[in-house]
Amino acid sequence: MAWEVIWSEKSVTQLEKIDKKNAKKIYDSVLDCIEDPFKAVIRLTNSHFFRLRVGDYRVILDLQQSKMIIFVVETDHRGKIYKK
């Protein structure tokens, strides 16, 4: 059974600011996770969030296992995303 992907308003805004080529890669990588997201993500230290690595970009995810929802919290360059 596939997971449902929900994008936060903040992540959509951040994705729109990224160049089209990398934005497409990020979008496709998130959609590739819908069968089994735990194969591609790593839990962030001292957090309940996970990260997905896509080149120089990182996608912060909240995996809600009981509802099978992948909630995309943030998407940004690797040098900026962890400073927030």
Image (cartoon, grey):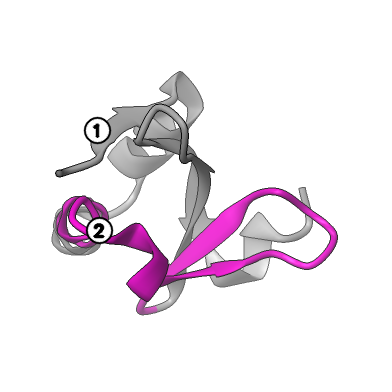
Query: Which residue: 34% across, 42% down?
Result: 15
Taking 12 as reference, is 32 left or right?
A: left
Q: CA distance from mark 1 to mark 2?
A: 10 Å
Task: Look at the numbered disc 1 and give the secondary structure of its residue.
Answer: strand
Residue at the outermost top position: 9
Taking 36 as reference, is 79 left or right?
A: right
> Contact, CB < 8 Å: mark 1 with mark 2?
no
Mark 2 sits on what residue? 33
Q: Is residue 78 above or below residue 5?
A: below
Q: Quadrant of the N terminus?
A: top left
Is residue 40 highlighted in magenta?
yes
What is the x, y in percent for residue 4?
A: 24, 33
- Circle nearer the N terminus (1, 2): 1
Q: Is residue 33 above or below residue 70?
A: below
Is residue 33 highlighted in magenta?
yes
- Say which mark, if any, is on residue 4: 1
Tell me the kind of residue under disc 2.
Answer: Cys
What is the x, y in percent for residue 11?
A: 44, 35
Task: Look at the numbered disc 2 and give the secondary structure of its residue.
Answer: loop
Nearer to us in this view, 1 or 18: 1
Nearer to us in this view, 72 or 41: 41
Q: Is residue 77 above or below residue 75?
A: below
Quadrant of residue 21 in the image? bottom left
The stretch of residues the image draws in magenta is 27-55
